[in-house]
Image (cartoon, rainbow, N blue to C red):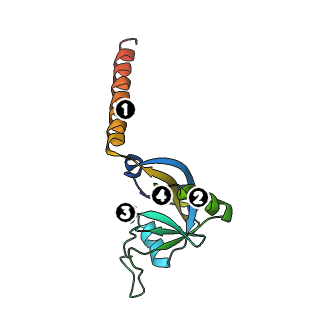
């Protein structure tokens, strides 16, 4: 059976854009067990509590929940475990320099399959304060109102 082409989204961290000011993003491969891949192909994963760390020059994905494969046997994987991420040395060094600044962390934004390979999208994020979140919501509401007003104005011109 041929691998599906393109990008197939498995899980997305929707709260990340609300809770963090996101900077540069990077795509990383994941070291997974067979039952983890099967569980991901079934669309089961949660990035809610996930984050990434850099330890001894290696990037690790922590706190991501990939539930056990329903049809797995006693060799099934643990749902929440540390998973190694695959990046080039230059990318790891660059991320390490950016995370060294205080208040910055690596946030997983999405898990997806790219041409059949499991990938995770990471971003360097700085935590938002409560007033930042309120400001973002206010901007979004103002933009929505402006779009709505523009749409009603343009309807009358036909």
Residue found 50% across the figure and 66% down from its top:
53
Residue found 42% across the figure and 71% down from its top:
39
Q: Residue 158: give x, y in percent of width and height.
A: 40, 13
Residue that label 4 marks? 105
Q: Marks 3 and 4, Cα distance to the nearest angstrom?
A: 13 Å
Residue that label 1 marks? 139
Q: Marks 1 and 2, Cα distance to the nearest angstrom?
A: 30 Å
Farthest residue in the front direction? 102
Residue that label 2 marks? 95
Sequence-first disc among 3 and 2? 3
Answer with left or right where residue 53 lies relative to residue 154.
right
Q: Is mark 3 on a helix, strand or loop?
A: loop
Residue that label 3 marks? 49
Name the one closer to the observer, 99 or 136.
99
Quarter assignment of residue 135: top left
Are the residues tagged 4 and 2 within 8 Å (C-beta)?
no
Sequence-first disc among 3 and 4? 3
Front label number (1 vs 2): 2
Name the one closer to the observer, 130 or 43.
130
Residue found 51% across the figure and 57% down from its top:
122
Q: Residue 88: give x, y in percent of width and height.
A: 66, 64
Looking at the figure, which quarter contains the N terminus?
bottom right
Mark count: 4
């Amino acid at each position: 059976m041929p691998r599906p082409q393109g990008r197939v989204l498995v899980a997305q961290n929707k709260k990340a854009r609300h809770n963090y000011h996101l900077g540069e993003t990077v795509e990383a491969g994941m070291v997974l067990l067979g039952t983890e891949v099967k569980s991901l192909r079934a669309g089961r994963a949660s990035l809610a509590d996930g984050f990434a760390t850099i330890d001894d020059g290696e990037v690790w994905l922590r706190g991501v929940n990939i539930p056990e494969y329903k049809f797995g046997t006693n060799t099934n994987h643990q749902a929440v475990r540390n998973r190694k991420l695959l990046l080039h040395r230059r990318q790891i060094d660059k991320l390490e320099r950016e995370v060294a600044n205080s208040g910055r962390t690596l946030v997983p934004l999405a898990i997806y399959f790219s041409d059949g390979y499991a990938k995770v999208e990471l971003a360097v994020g700085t935590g938002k304060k409560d007033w930042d979140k309120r400001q973002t919501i206010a901007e979004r509401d103002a933009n929505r109102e402006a779009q709505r007003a523009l749409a009603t104005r343009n309807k009358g011109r036909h």
